[in-house]
Amino acid sequence: MKRRIPLPRVEGQASRQAHADMPPGTYEREISKEGFFGPAAMFHHKHPPTGWVEFEGPLRPHAFDLGRLAGPQASPWQAAEVLRNANVRVRFWSTSGPMDHLVRNADGDDLLFVHAGSGELFCDYGRLDIEAGDYVMVPRGTMWRIDAREPVAMLMIEAVNSSYELPDKGLLGGHAIFDPAMLDTPRMDEAFVRQQTDDRRWQVRVKRHQAISTVTYPFNPLDAIGWHGDLSVVRINVRHIRPVVSHRYHLPPSAHTTFVGQRFVVCTFVPRPFETDPGALKVPFFHNNDDYDEVIFYHAGNFFSRDNIHPGMMTLHPCGFTHGPHPKALQNMLAQSKPATDEYAVMIDTRDALEITDAARAVEWAGYVDSWKG
Ligand SMILES: [Fe+2]
């Protein structure tokens, strides 16, 4: 049996409502457990907690320009891994034209996020159009291939040895953020049936424990004429996500959770109105989300809380230091000139430390740690 230490307390000069009505001239910082769901303390600082002048040692904020990674690659299994731990592996794949083989991930479910391009996904379950902004969840073991109409770049987020689920929406109810009825599934349509006539020898490249094995068939194995069950590839586009907002309270990033894996979550930032209450914070609060490493992939728009970040970049804020808005965004901490944000981004928060691969280090922007210097 265990029980949390019973609090809260208020010490010194402090507001009693998080993210609102801060003592004048102060900068709020939250130290938070359990990814903003657990115990937390809000401090009111005289200086922005990102006002460091030196940062030494391996722990630091990172930014990677994934658009500079080598590509295109014919197979997703050739795509560079950028970040990984025991529960999640993140790769960035660019490809063009039709794949001449099928792939299957035997290590876990894959969540594909289409950053650019368009095409068709052919898989065991049928055919699905894909376009920029789509999330496509591919259950472990599914055979699939892509026929890219325009060159495709995608983030591939593997739930190692586990399955993707939807978050518990709690008080919001099950239809908030996006209704599960909005999830599309592949269809065994005319185009799917037509591709079955492509009956050359087909290879299936299977990834298991990071090794690739190849199974060759003298026929096209995507030859099912039907299926039934409660497992499938599912797709939703970011434009169908309806964000949760409060005009009087800056919600924590965890309010934007869209998919849940084992010991990590995937959240989605989409355009939303700024808070209008005069005392409410209008930018992300400075925080130590110290139970999680935080990754953000910038898909499209104008990233209002960060300078010098463009679409296709990815930041990693490991736990252990405070992060928050860049100085330009901070000027609008309590008064925003625009009515709404204009950003689409994918956040991956992991319970365990992430390893940065050599491929990611090769496209790292080393000056990112100094980008808070205003
Ligand atoms: Fe964060």
Image: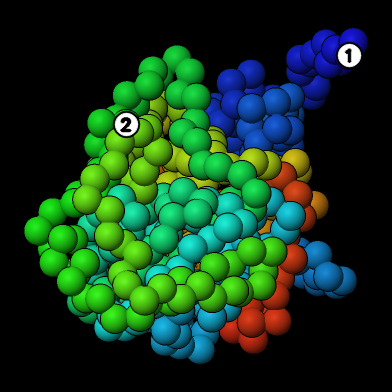
Residue at left 53%, top 28%?
Answer: 20
Residue at left 49%, top 63%?
Answer: 104
Picture quadrant of residue 39: top right
| Image quarter in which the N terminus is found | top right
Pick whichever, 176 or 87, lies toward us. 87
Picture quadrant of residue 44: top right
Identify the residue position indicated by label 2 in the image: 180
Pick whichever, 36 or 179, lies toward us. 179
Q: Does ligand 1 reach within 8 Å of label 2's beta carbon?
A: no
Residue at left 34%, top 26%?
Answer: 176
Residue at left 50%, top 24%?
Answer: 168
Mark 2 touches mark 1? (CB < 8 Å) = no
Depicted 358 relative to depicted 340: above or below: below
Mark 2 element type: helix
Distance from label 2 to label 1 (Cα)? 36 Å
Which mark is nearer the camera, 2 or 1? Answer: 2
Q: Is residue 213 left or right of residue 126?
A: right
Determine the residue located farthest toward the front in the rendered image.
218
Depicted 194 relative to depicted 94: above or below: above
